[in-house]
Image (cartoon, rainbow, N blue to C red):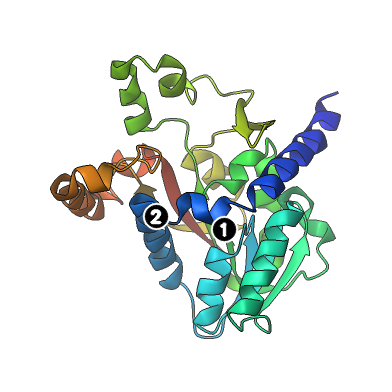
Amino acid sequence: MEAAAKPVNEQYAAKAFSTQSAIFDNIYADNTIVSYKRDRVRAHVLQYLKPNSTILELNSGTGEDATFFAALGHKLHATDIAEGMQQKLREKAANQGLGNLISTELCSFTQLSELRNKGPFNQVFSNFAGLNCTGELDKVLRSLPALLNDNGVATLVILPKFCLWESLLLFKGKFKTATRRWFSKNGVKAHVEGTYFTCWYYNPSYVIDAVKDSCEVLSVEGLCTIVPPSYIEYFAEKHPKTYTWLKGLEQRYRFSRPWRFIGDYYIISLRKK
């Protein structure tokens, strides 16, 4: 029963995000903290990218990151399980004249051995917690070295099991939201566009242990550890001076303990040995 449930969960996630693809970009277009997060993640990735690199993107969504990196001259193979997201990505790439640099493939990150384009790539990239949509992250992580060139880098953005800002919602009486990561061993139900599916949370130690024989850890940095998560709506607009101050603090302490472990996300980069 356990093995059969996981593909079904992916089917539900694919349905949810295919439905959301029509409005996905509009939902987040004006969110200042979402833009901050994207800028942080992209800066992290760029420090490891050489000119004209090849990138395999997992859970590529509507292509916001794929088109960004392609516009810099990198070649992307963008994968996702949601057909709606892939269609939006192809439209975006064509509209921006980047179709020659971006290819797409409908493929789950738990089935990377079945990819038509196996690279190998200079970089594997997964943004904004797509990897939290599987209970088999260890399987995904073990598949990465075969897809990377020698000394290739994987950069993953993942939700950990504890988020300081989320926990503070206890003081607003939002017990369920504040504690949802604490008791998530068997996953937590997510709800997107009328469809329910399961998400899991993973600490950096889980990732590091899963790849210890094949990859070295280049860096781990917290994201939205001191800056509030993007779902705290209009924080940046309502408190611009505080927001600027918090960004400065996060920039200073993003690699430090405990801050790199207690954010809404963490960014981890691994180099193939």
- The tag earlier along the polypeptide, 2 or 1, is 2
Q: Position of residue 239 (x, y in %)?
A: 18, 43
Q: Residue at x 25, y 47 (%)?
A: 236
Q: Position of residue 20 (x, y in %)?
A: 64, 47
Q: Position of residue 140 (x, y in %)?
A: 69, 49
Q: Residue at x 24, y 48 (%)?
A: 237
Provide the secondary structure element on which disc 1 rests. strand
Residue 30: mark in rendering? 2
Which of discs 2 and 1 lies nearer the camera? The answer is 2
Provide the secondary structure element on which disc 2 rests. loop
Q: Quadrant of residue 7?
A: top right
Asked if residue 251 can be seen in this view, the reply is: yes
Amino acid at the residue labelled 2: Asp
Lateral position of residue 118 relative to residue 230, left or right: right
Q: Quadrant of residue 73?
A: bottom right
Asked if residue 75 can be seen in this view, the reply is: no
